[in-house]
Amino acid sequence: MTIKYQTERLILRPWREDDKPHFAAMNADARVMEFFPELKTREQSDQMIDECNRRLARDGFTFWAVDRKDNNEFTGFVGLNTFEANLPFCPCVEIGWRLAYAHWGHGFATEAARKCLSLAFTDFSLNKIVSFTTVANTRSRHVMEKIGMVDTGNNFLHPSIDEASGMREHCLYQAVSWIKP
Ligand SMILES: CC(C)(COP(=O)(O)OP(=O)(O)OC[C@H]1O[C@@H](n2cnc3c(N)ncnc32)[C@H](O)[C@@H]1OP(=O)(O)O)[C@@H](O)C(=O)NCCC(=O)NCCS
C-alpha cells in the first residue's frame, strides 16, 4: 500500500520515476544549492530518489516528495531520514527539506516540516529528532525554529564536507517532543 500524508496545502508521498527530471533541475539550481558544496548531476540526483524509496521501504519514513494540492506541482522534498556518521549524536533521525526556488516564500517547507515532526513522535514513535545545516543557512535555521526545534549550541564539523568549501561547520537543532507551535 502506498502511504501518503497530507497537510492543508500539500501531499507528502513516495517518489516516482517522473519526479527525476524535476528533482535534477532543482539540484542543478545554484540558488537552491547555495549552502551545499556542489550542484548535483542528474545521476546523483536520480540516486537520491532511489535511495529515498529504499529507506521508505526499510524505515517507513524518508525525505518524501512533496506536491502542492492546488496545481499538483512537485515542489521538492521534506521528511525524516536516518543519519549515520561518526558523530556524537549518531545514529539519529534528522528532519530536512529542499524546495525548488519557485516554491519558496509560501510557507510550504514549514507546513510540511510540522507534519513530519508530529509524525516522528506519533506514527514512528521516535523520541528525538535532529536537524542540522551549515551555520550560514539562515532560511533553513528559520524553518527549524518555526517548527519549535531548539539550537543545541553543539556545532560540529560535517565529516563529508570539505573544509575548503567554508561550509563545514554545522549547527545542530533538536526536538524531543511534539508541541503544536
Ligand atoms: C530552506 C527552505 C526549504 C526554506 O523555504 P521557505 O519557503 O523560505 O520556507 P517557509 O516554508 O518557512 O516559508 C517562508 C516564508 O513564506 C512566507 N509565506 C507566504 N505565505 C505563507 C503561508 N501561508 N504560511 C506561512 N508562510 C508563508 C512567509 O513570509 C515565510 O517567511 P517568514 O516565516 O519569515 O515570515 C528553502 O530555502 C530551500 O529549499 N533552500 C535550499 C535547500 C536547503 O538549504 N535545505 C536545507 C539544508 S540542511
Image: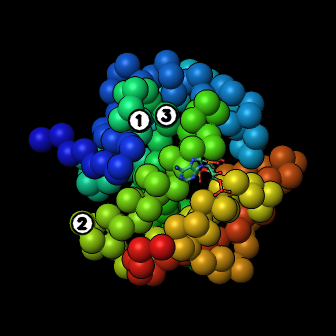
**In the rendered image, which residue does mark 2 sit on?**
123
Does any atom of ligand 1 lie closer than 8 Å to the CB of label 1?
Answer: no
Can the viewer see residue 90 in this picture?
A: no
Q: From the top left corner, tell me how far across and down residue 122 is, in percent.
A: 27, 71
* Tag 3: amino acid: Thr
Q: Residue at x 46, y 54 (%)?
A: 111
- Residue at the (33%, 41%) spot, across then down: 11
Q: Which element carries disc 3, helix, strand or loop?
A: strand
Q: Which circle, 2 or 1, is nearer the viewer? A: 1
Displayed quadrant of residue 177: bottom left
* Pair 3/1: label in front: 1
Q: Nearer the viewer, residue 128 or 82?
A: 128
Q: In this view of the protein, which residue sits in the foreground, 156 or 35?
A: 35
Number of marks: 3
Q: Distance between the residues labelled 2 and 1?
A: 23 Å
Q: Which tag, 2 or 1, sits closer to the chain's start?
A: 1
Tell me if label 3 and label 1 are in contact, CB under 8 Å.
Answer: yes
Q: Which amino acid does label 2 sit on?
A: Asp
Q: Quadrant of residue 60?
A: bottom left
In the picture shown, does residue 126 fall above or below 158?
A: below
> Which residue carries the number 3 mark?
75
The answer to whether the residue bearing label 3 lies less than 8 angstroms from the nearest atom of ligand 1 is: no
Q: Quadrant of the N terminus?
A: top left
Label 3 or label 2, whichever lies nearer to me, is 3
* Among the two numbered marks 3 and 1 on one chain, the one whose residue lies closer to the N terminus: 1
Residue at label 1?
Answer: 68
The x and y percentages for residue 57 are 25, 46
- Estimate the spatial distance between the alpha carbons at disc 3 and disc 2, rounded to whole Å: 24 Å
